[in-house]
Image (cartoon, rainbow, N blue to C red):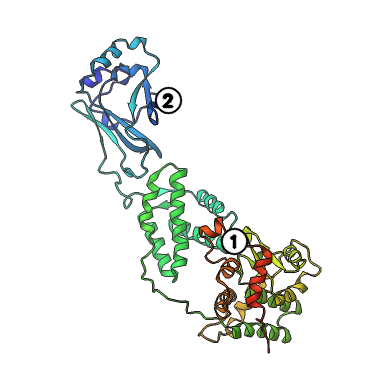
Amino acid sequence: MPPFDQHLDKQFEWSIADNDNRALLEIHRSTISLHRAKTDYSYPTIRLPHTLSKLAGLRTRIYQTVHAGALAFLVVVSPLCEAPTASKKVIENSDKQPESVAFTRLPFSKISPFLPYFQSPRIFTNNGYLYPNTNVNEPQSPAELALSFTQEELLSYTTHRKTGLAKKSIQWLDKASHLFWLHTEGIISKKNLDTLRQYVVNKYTTDWSKSKVLSFAVAFLKYLSKTRLDTRYRAYELFLERPKVLKERKRVTNRIVTKEDIESVLTYIAKAELEGRISHYQAQQFTGFVIFSTYTGQRSMATASKLIVAQFREALKMDKPVLLITAKQCKIKFEHYCPLHPAVVAAVKPLLEGREDDEAVFSYDSFVNFVRKDRNEIPLSKINSHFVIGDLRKFAEQYGDIIQWEQSNRAYILTHGVSGVEWAHYRHPLPEYVYDVYMRYWRQTKFSTA
């Protein structure tokens, strides 16, 4: 028997012949304690059973690995290193020692999650030594390995991600989740992820759409690595990288929206009412939405669609009507005041009659469907394209250059470029001054319909 084994009690003895096939043997359970060697310096300590106290003083090597999906450490004891004199005294008086003695000291306080992913250490002896080794028949890379997950885990993660998101974002999460399961069916492997990535690259033309699906897949792998305590899942992110594309730099946007284009939209709404394709109330709704979004430049889906009747009623009580838009109603979570032009007041007042305070003012979804159905009937004058709802906000920004809208007031109302220190810690415009500055530039702006 090797000298190393002579120090162990009989219950821990094993033969060299069958050691390579021996499973890990649990000999003790303890809590990692913190040893403070001096002020502002401490390190974790793991204690072994009292029956192994004769190992004190021997040199060790400590390897980090993964066992049963959890972080694990392999302690290799060198049998050729004699215990120092002080340690021998400890061994001689081992019967007087407490139940456990400090044995292993971790050489680092921060554990890196990216140390060997795919090594599954086995133990064998050679002249009394213990060495970590890997079986050549076991998978050694993510290209050869396959990991599993359940559909319940995927659905649980998807549900968690959808909390508090807008309808459009939820639709993309559902789509990404469906595609991930469709191409993996619970097995994460290089082949399955390559198939998923290739499908996404071929199906979607915009980099934004590709990013939605692939980013979801990467985030789910990260989720699995945490819930299963298995860092190997993170290695598969390599196969989900978005394709590199050479983006064309543009000095300015190529989409131009003019005052004549807005008037064409209003005219088309009036024409649709005369032809009986929409009701009078729908015409009021659509006109009010266009007028409000054009004069204020607020985001259509993130802000305008969430405004409620009570907010407008409160604003119309003021001599200088100003709408308070809350952080929840702003895409960038920026609470701000939005002045209401007299034309906006006239267009919105009919929409408030006989309605509850908590009702949404504008029928956003109805207007979206109207525009999509008839989009080819509303062309833009300066470019070869048709009107989309996002053009309303774009007009406010572009028309602001024509009327020389003051930059600070414009940035505040449109919530463009308000993430700097001056906005976070210094500026706080009062509602009456926001209204005065705004009306100085927009007062003479009016739209006519044919």
**Residue density around tag 1, few if under 14, some if 14–19, many if 20 or more, within 10 Å:** few
State the image coordinates of residue 196 (x, y, percent, origin top left): 41, 61
**Residue density around tag 2, few if under 14, some if 14–19, many if 20 or more, within 10 Å:** few
Q: Earlier in the sequence, mark 1 or mark 2?
A: 2
Q: Is residue 26 visible?
A: no
> Along the line of sight, which residue is nearer the eye, 163 or 338?
338
Measure the C-alpha gap from mark 1 to mark 2.
47 Å
Q: Which residue: 76% across, 69% down?
A: 319
Q: SS for tag 2?
A: loop
Q: Which residue is mark 2?
A: 30
State the image coordinates of residue 228 (x, y, percent, origin top left): 45, 43
In the rendered image, which quarter is residue 284 located in?
bottom right
> Along the line of sight, which residue is nearer the eye, 254 or 143?
254
Q: Is residue 37 left or right of residue 326?
A: left
The residue sitting at the bottom extreme is: 450
The answer to whether 441 is drawn above or below residue 175 in the figure is below
Q: Which mark is residue 130?
A: none
Q: The residue under label 1 is which amino acid type?
A: Ala
State the image coordinates of residue 80 (x, y, percent, origin top left): 19, 23
State the image coordinates of residue 365 (x, y, percent, origin top left): 65, 70
Q: Which residue: 45% across, 56% down?
A: 217
Q: SS for tag 1?
A: loop
Q: Which residue is mark 1?
A: 166
Q: Is residue 131 visible?
A: yes
Q: The residue under label 2 is which amino acid type?
A: Ser
